[in-house]
């Protein structure tokens, strides 16, 4: 009981200190750039009808795809405790191979070249 109380006190104090610092620190040097809203590199005060680059969205989708890959591979160390760890290895290899082939395809098609 004493250990649990100590852990709760330490985590509460650390959370309070970090929350106080996070609210206090940015207010020390307010700047027009820091105070302006940021909308993915677009001017938020301009017209909403301006054309945008589809390459930006391609890079964003690829980023999300590889984040999903990491999320799918996170439980991989626990797969060693299954009845057949080779099945886990086969599935993980299949996911990695498929995503690697997709990345190579995008690279060869020139989808990752930001400037033409």
Image (spheres, rainbow, N blue to C red):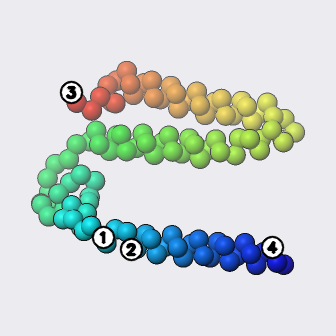
Residues at marks 2 and 1 touching, judged by CB atoms closer than 8 Å: yes
Q: Secondary structure at mark 2?
A: helix
Which quarter of the image is occupied by the N terminus?
bottom right
The reply, left or right, for residue 110 in relation to residue 116 is right
Q: 10 Å neighbourhood of mark 4: few (<14), some, or many (≥20)?
A: few
Q: What residue do we see at 75% from left, 36% from top?
A: 88
Q: Using the image as rendered, state which of residue 59 and residue 102 is in the foreground.
A: 59
Q: What residue do we see at 57% from left, 42% from top?
A: 70
Q: Position of residue 12 (x, y in %)?
A: 62, 76
Q: Secondary structure at mark 4?
A: helix
Q: Who comes first in sequence, dot 2 or dot 3?
A: 2
Q: 10 Å neighbourhood of mark 3: few (<14), some, or many (≥20)?
A: few
Residue occupied by mark 1: 28
Residue occupied by mark 2: 24
Q: What residue do we see at 22% from left, 30% from top?
A: 115
Which quarter of the image is occupied by the C terminus?
top left
Q: Is residue 74 above or below residue 92?
A: below
Q: What residue do we see at 25% from left, 63% from top?
A: 34
Q: 10 Å neighbourhood of mark 2: few (<14), some, or many (≥20)?
A: few
Residue 116, labelled with which disc?
3
Q: Position of residue 29 (x, y in %)?
A: 27, 67
């Amino acid at each position: 009981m004493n250990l649990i109380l100590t852990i709760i006190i330490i985590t509460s104090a650390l959370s309070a200190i970090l929350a106080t610092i996070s609210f206090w620190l940015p207010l020390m040097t307010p700047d027009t750039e820091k105070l302006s809203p940021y909308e993915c590199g677009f001017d938020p005060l301009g017209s909403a009808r301006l054309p945008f680059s589809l390459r930006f969205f391609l890079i964003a989708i690829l980023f999300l795809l590889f984040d999903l890959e990491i999320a799918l591979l996170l439980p991989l160390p626990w797969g060693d405790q299954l009845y057949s760890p080779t099945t886990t290895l086969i599935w993980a290899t299949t996911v990695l191979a498929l995503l690697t082939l997709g990345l190579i395809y995008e690279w060869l098609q020139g989808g990752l070249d930001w400037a033409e």
